Amino acid sequence: MRELVGVVKEYGSRPVLRGVDLAVAAGEVVGVLGTNGSGKSTLLRILAGISRPSSGTTSGRPRTGYVPDRFPARQRMSALAYLCHLGRISGLPAAEARRRAGAWLERFALAGGPDTPLRDLSKGNAQKVGLVQALLPEPDLLVLDEPWSGLDAATRAVLTEVVGEAAAAGTAVVFTDHRPDFVQSTATRSHRLVDGRLQLLDAEVSTCRILLRGGEDADWAGRPGVVAARRDGDVELEVAVAERESLLLEAIRRGCAVIAVDSRAGRR
């Protein structure tokens, strides 16, 4: 269906994705958890074919519906006219595009009705139109960037139903969200994006504790491999073991005294 192998994405000299492998098959619902700035949106744009990786390979060209994290709705067209236009671009006959758009807008209960201009819609209602434009062509792959954000409770429930129905019909679905419990309960497979790397949400990741004293100030929380950073006089870091040596070297270069390095293992 769609596969990424060793995908790297850089903006200038800043790496956002670091060797991501992800294969998505028909009927799967894949959830991706991550903090703001973790690279979730970048990953989804590459999956949707909107952005190209700096290196690595992508394969598969499914018919794709994509909902960005912010749907651009500042337009004079009505919701229905806009969707009919997109439906025709995707190859649907005008009458079929209008029928599908109207049915989806009714199911998502668009406030103000289908003739409401896009620029008059609230964020939540603009999101509904964004969802409909992705569903119109009956895609083989549905890529959703935090799609539940901004929706009212009733519409969130409808969207969860729609995702389940799409998967049952053979559509592959990939979505991002920031709620671990929700991702795990909604997806058939869950991942976490950390430091540009994708890992199974339930995977055990070995970490260690590093205690530093003195030296130059640094944004330790933003360093690759740092799971948690606390400052109370001394600086206490919880870091992935794989990044331990590079972080210790940086700390020493900054004049920090390494007070302790304790091994531990935890779910991350």
Image (cartoon, rainbow, N blue to C red):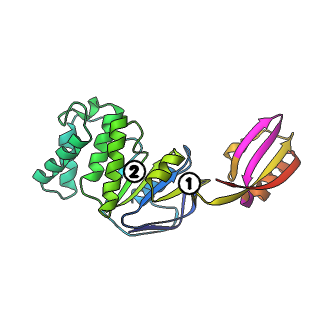
Instruction: For residue 53, say whether it is visible.
Output: yes
Asked if residue 238 lies in the magenta stretch, the reply is yes
Question: Quarter of the image holding residue 155?
Answer: top left
Q: Is 97 left or right of 190, judged from the image as shown?
A: left
Magenta span dominant secondary structure? strand
The residue positioned 55% from the left and 45% from the top of the image is 37
The residue positioned 55% from the left and 48% from the top of the image is 34
Q: Do the residues labelled 1 and 2 touch (CB within 8 Å)?
A: no
Q: Which amino acid does label 1 sit on?
A: Arg
Q: Residue 117's spot in the image, x, y percent? A: 22, 33
- Within-10-Å neighbours for mark 2: few <14, some 14–19, many 20+: many
Q: Can you say whether 9 is above or below 233 in the image?
A: below
Residue 144, numbered label: 2
Report the front residue among 55 and 71: 71
Q: Residue 212's spot in the image, x, y percent? A: 84, 44
Residue identified by numbered label 1: 192
Which segment is the magenta one?
A: 228-242
Report the front residue among 29 and 147: 29
